[in-house]
């Protein structure tokens, strides 16, 4: 796949709160031309042009780590100021209202209403390559073919999109779906807040194009 023009040297912080593939994310972002720093320093993360929040493991553990690093305040303040944030994998899931794992409910950041729950499929976890049904007019998937494949590793997902936008002057979120046993939310674009359930940093040329698309909006 041939990439679009290289992203300009935008300053992007990969937030290091102990629960994410920060080195993989750093390499992928640097590959597409970003000026990348891995840090948990609040001020440096606040002042970057883009903030990437990775996440692997359990929802509750990620939330605990994020709060310990003041990442909940960081994400909220950036979004209040219209400053871009992107979540990946569990870094996407914690943006929702709550997660339920093994019967235990944990509060998320509640940037979007909704519940992260177990995937209902013959094979769990959902591990490997899958296609998505990109939202109409998506900037995140611009220039990518419909049959592009992305790398997923997860056992939990959001199955229902609950946010209603009643104001005609506010752009409705763009929600992308994938299917593994049942449909689930694979990506969201909502003003300055974008997120993917899959790992763009592990998705080859398609993932590189997607990260380029995000950086080009910063």
Image (cartoon, rainbow, N blue to C red):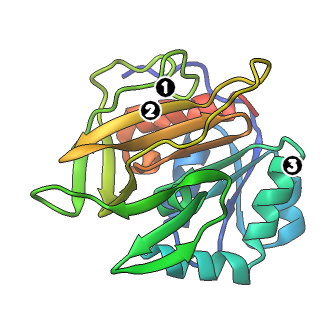
Q: Where is residue 100 in the image (x, y as percent from the top left)?
A: 42, 72
Q: How crowded is mark 1: few (under 14 residues within 10 Å), some or many (20 or more)?
A: many
SS class of the residue under badge 3?
helix
Determine crowd level at label 3: few under 14, some 14-19, many 20+ residues with C-alpha closer than 10 A.
few
Sequence-wise first label, 2 or 1: 1
At horizontal 60% and vertical 67% (from top left) the residue drawn is 108
Residue at image location 42% in from the left, 45% down from the top: 160
Mark sitting on residue 176: 2
- Real-space Cα distance between discs 2 and 1? 9 Å
Give the left or right position of residue 36, taking residue 176 as reference: right
Instruction: Report if residue 55 is visible in the image.
Output: no
Between marks 1 and 3 in the image, the one whose residue lies nearer the viewer: 3
For the residue pair 6 and 105, the one nearer the viewer reads as 105
Residue 166 seen in the figure? yes
Q: In this view, does 64 lie above or below 217?
A: below
Q: Picture coordinates of residue 164 (x, y %)?
A: 62, 35
Q: Which of 113 and 32 is in front in this view?
A: 113
- 10 relative to 118, above or below: above
Tell me the quarter of the image containing the C terminus: top right
Question: Toward which corner of the image does residue 71 lie, by quadrant?
Answer: bottom right
The part of the image, by quadrant, that contains residue 75 is bottom right
Looking at the figure, which quarter contains the N terminus? top left
- Residue located beneath label 1 in the image: 141
Give left or right: position of 50 versus 134: right
Between discs 2 and 3, the one toward the N terminus: 3
Residue ID at (74%, 68%): 72
Q: Name the residue under label 3.
A: 80
Q: Do the residues labelled 2 and 1 touch (CB within 8 Å)?
A: yes
């Amino acid at each position: 796949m041939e990439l679009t023009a290289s992203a300009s040297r935008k300053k992007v912080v990969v937030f290091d709160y102990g629960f994410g593939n920060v080195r993989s994310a750093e390499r992928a972002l640097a590959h597409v031309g970003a000026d990348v720093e891995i840090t948990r320093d609040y001020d440096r993360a606040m002042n970057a042009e883009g903030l990437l929040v990775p996440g692997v493991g359990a929802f509750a553990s990620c939330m605990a780590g994020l709060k310990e690093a003041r990442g909940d305040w960081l994400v909220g303040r950036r979004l209040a100021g219209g400053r871009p944030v992107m979540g990946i994998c569990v870094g996407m899931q914690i943006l929702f209202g709550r997660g339920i794992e093994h019967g235990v409910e944990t509060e998320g950041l509640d940037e979007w209403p909704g519940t992260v729950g177990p995937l209902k499929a013959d094979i769990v976890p959902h591990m490997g390559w899958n296609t998505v049904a990109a939202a109409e007019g998506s900037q995140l998937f611009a220039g990518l073919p419909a049959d592009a494949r992305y790398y997923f590793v997860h056992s939990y997902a959001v199955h229902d999109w609950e946010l209603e936008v009643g104001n005609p002057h506010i752009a409705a979120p763009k929600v992308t779906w994938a299917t593994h046993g049942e449909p689930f939310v694979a990506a969201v674009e909502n003003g300055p807040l974008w997120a993917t359930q899959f790992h763009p940093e592990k998705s080859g040329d398609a993932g590189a194009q997607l990260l380029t698309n995000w950086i080009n909006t910063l």
